[in-house]
Amino acid sequence: MRPARVGVVGAGNIGTGVITDLVLHGIDAVVVDLSEEILRKAEEEVLKNVRFGPLLSKTLPAVTREDAARRLVLTTELKDVSSCDLIIENVTEDWDIKKGVYQKLEKAVPPEVCFGANTSCISITQIASATKRAANVVGVHFMNPVHLKPTVEVIRGFHTSDRAVDSLLQLLSRLNKEAIIVEDLPGFVSNRISHLFMNEAAFALQDGVATAEKIDLIFKKCFGHKMGPLETADLIGLDTVMRSLDVLYESFHDPKYRCCPLLRKFVHAGHLGRKTGRGFHVYPEERGGEAAARAINPAPEAARADATKRRSA
C-alpha cells in the first residue's frame, strides 16, 4: 500500500526536511515533538522550504503555503500517529531516548504499521530489539537537506521483512527518490566512511596543518566535492557528528573512531555549526566578527605553535 499519511517523530533538522518532502508530494504528515515551540519552529521552516524548494530544484513540485499547511498535523502526543500508514522516526542519536520512543510507539500504532528508523549510526537490528515487531523495522538514512537530495540509504536489519522494505520503497518512490539498500552494521556505508573523513579533517585543523577554509577548499577544488568535510560537519551539526562518532567507537571498539578533542570542545562550547551560526566556520547570521573567526580558525603560525606546544607537553 502506498502511504498516504506518515507519522514523523522528531522535528529537528532532518525531520523538518522529511516533513517538507512529504507535503511537497501531497502526503499528509503527523508531526510529533516535545514542545509547541519546537513544532512552531519546524512549521516555519517547512513552509519556508515549500516556498523556496522548487526554486532550488526543478524536480520539486510547486505547492502553495496554504496547501502545505493543510497537510500538517502538529502534536506533542505520540498517540496521534495511530492513524498513520508508516512512521519515520528522527529523534536524537541517543540509544536510551530512541529505545523509549519505540517502546511507546509499540503501544500507539497498530501492529501491522512499519517503522522507518532514520538514524546516522545506531544498528537497525538494535533499534528493532526495542519492539515486538522487529520484522517491521527498516532503516532509512536521509541526507541533508532531505527535500533536495535524490538518493536515500536504506538499511535492512537482521529481522527486517520484505514487506517493511517495500512499504518504505513505495514512500520513497512517491518522493521521487532512489533507494540504495545496504546491510546492517553501525554507521552502515555512508556514515561509517564520512564520519572518519570529517573527524580526520578536525584533527588536521587541531594540529595546525591548515585553516578550516583551506581544508575545505582542497576537497572542493582538488577533488570536486560540493562541500568540504568541515562544512559538511557544520551542516549536519557538530553535536550529531560527535554522538555518531561515539556510537561508532562504542560499537566497533576501534580507536580510528575516537572523536577529535577539538570537535568535542566546540560542542561543549555550544558551537554546533550552521544551526547556531558558528562551528568550524562562522556564518553570516552569527555576529562574531574577525576575533570569533580567528578563535575558531587560528592563523597557521599560531595553530602550529599551539600544536608544537601540545606535543612537547
Image (cartoon, helix red, strand yellow):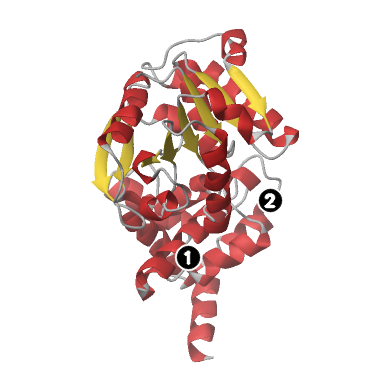
Residue at numbered disc 2? 289
What's the amino acid at mark 1? Asp
Rendered-image quadrant of the N terminus: top left
Classed neighbour count for the residue bearing mark 2: other residues with Cα under 10 Å, few (<14), some (14–19), many (≥20): few
Q: Secondary structure at mark 1?
A: helix
Residue 143 against residue 148 in the figure, above or below: below
* Residue type pointed to by label 2: Gly
Q: Can residue 280 be seen from the camera position used here?
A: no
Q: Is residue 216 left or right of residue 78?
A: left
Which of the 4 image quadrants contains residue 295?
A: bottom right
Relative horizontal placement of residue 199, taking residue 309 as reference (left or right): left
Question: 286 and 304: which one is in front?
Answer: 286
Q: Secondary structure at mark 2?
A: helix
Residue beneath label 1, please? 246
- Image height of 224 relative to 208, above or below: above
**Residue toward you, 124 or 207:** 124
Q: Residues within 10 Å of mark 1 (few under 14, many from 20)?
A: some
Residue appearing at x 74%, y 32% in the figure: 36
